[in-house]
């Protein structure tokens, strides 16, 4: 009886833990080009908009430079608070994202409107191709690839467009990451 009660109470707990892990993995990570609003409560001279530079760094008075790219807003906020503690007693730091310009994908080749597109929400390949006006009549829909950079290496991910249109091979309709390049021959 006790083990049955224990099992029934563990299932919701395990679900809750796994659900929180999934949410943490989906948290937005900052990109070069994103614009942040940084403010320190009760310090008028420490309120500033900063742009994440191409090298991933931001600069803030008294805190100096710090890496922001690839980190969450909460991480950057905590680092700024830690650095400002040297100069201020228990600073209350707020960091918010003003613009996600750095969160973009690039679509090139035989689409109606090639170019770079800012992702203000999570997008998969089909949604991104829709933003580009769809494929042109001469596009090779069976040879579409996504180029994804991971550090110094590059990965090629095939997209089976013709199969996706028929409701098959849906796992190739991948969720895009910032900097992905979709190539349509």
Image: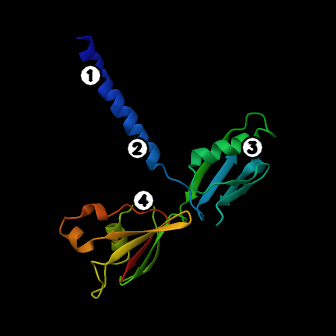
Q: Which mark lies nearer to you, 2 or 3?
A: 2
Q: Which mark lies nearer to you, 1 or 3?
A: 1
Mark 3 is surrounded, within 10 Å at the Cα level, by few (under 14), some (14 to 19) or many (20 or more) other residues, namely some
Q: Tell me which residue sits at (40%, 59%) in the image.
A: 122
Residue 121: numbered disc: 4
- Direction from residue 38 to residue 173 in the image, left or right: left
Count of numbered marks: 4
- Which sits earlier in the primary sequence, circle 1 or circle 2? 1
Q: Secondary structure at mark 3?
A: helix
Whether residues under marks 4 and 2 lie with C-beta atoms below 8 angstroms apart, the answer is no
- Which sits earlier in the primary sequence, circle 4 or circle 3? 3
Nearest the camera: 89 or 67?
Answer: 67
Gap in Å between the C-alphas at discs 1 and 2? Answer: 22 Å
- Which sits earlier in the primary sequence, circle 1 or circle 4? 1
Gap in Å between the C-alphas at discs 1 and 4? Answer: 37 Å
Q: Which mark lies nearer to you, 1 or 4?
A: 1
Q: Which mark lies nearer to you, 4 or 2?
A: 2
Residue under numbered circle 1: 8
Residue 147 x/y as whole percent: 44, 71
Residue 22: numbered disc: 2
Gap in Å between the C-alphas at discs 4 and 2? Answer: 17 Å
In the rendered image, which quarter is residue 126 located in? bottom left
Residue 11 x/y as whole percent: 30, 27
Q: Secondary structure at mark 2?
A: helix
């Amino acid at each position: 009886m006790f083990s049955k009660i224990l099992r029934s109470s563990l299932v919701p707990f395990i679900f809750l833990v796994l659900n929180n892990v999934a949410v943490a993995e989906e948290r937005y990570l900052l990109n070069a080009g994103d614009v942040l609003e940084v403010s320190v409560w009760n310090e008028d001279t420490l309120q500033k908009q900063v742009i994440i530079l191409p090298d991933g760094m931001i600069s803030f008075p008294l805190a100096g430079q710090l890496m922001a790219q690839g980190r969450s807003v909460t991480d950057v906020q905590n680092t700024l608070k830690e650095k400002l503690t040297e100069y201020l007693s228990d600073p209350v730091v707020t960091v918010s994202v003003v613009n996600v310009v750095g969160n973009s994908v690039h679509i090139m080749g035989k689409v109606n409107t090639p170019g770079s597109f800012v992702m203000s929400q999570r997008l998969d390949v089909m949604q991104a191709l829709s933003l580009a006006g769809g494929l042109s009549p001469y596009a090779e829909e069976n040879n579409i690839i996504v180029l994804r950079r991971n550090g110094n290496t590059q990965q090629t991910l095939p997209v089976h467009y013709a199969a996706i249109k028929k409701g098959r091979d849906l796992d190739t309709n991948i969720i895009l990451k910032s900097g992905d390049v979709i190539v349509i021959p």
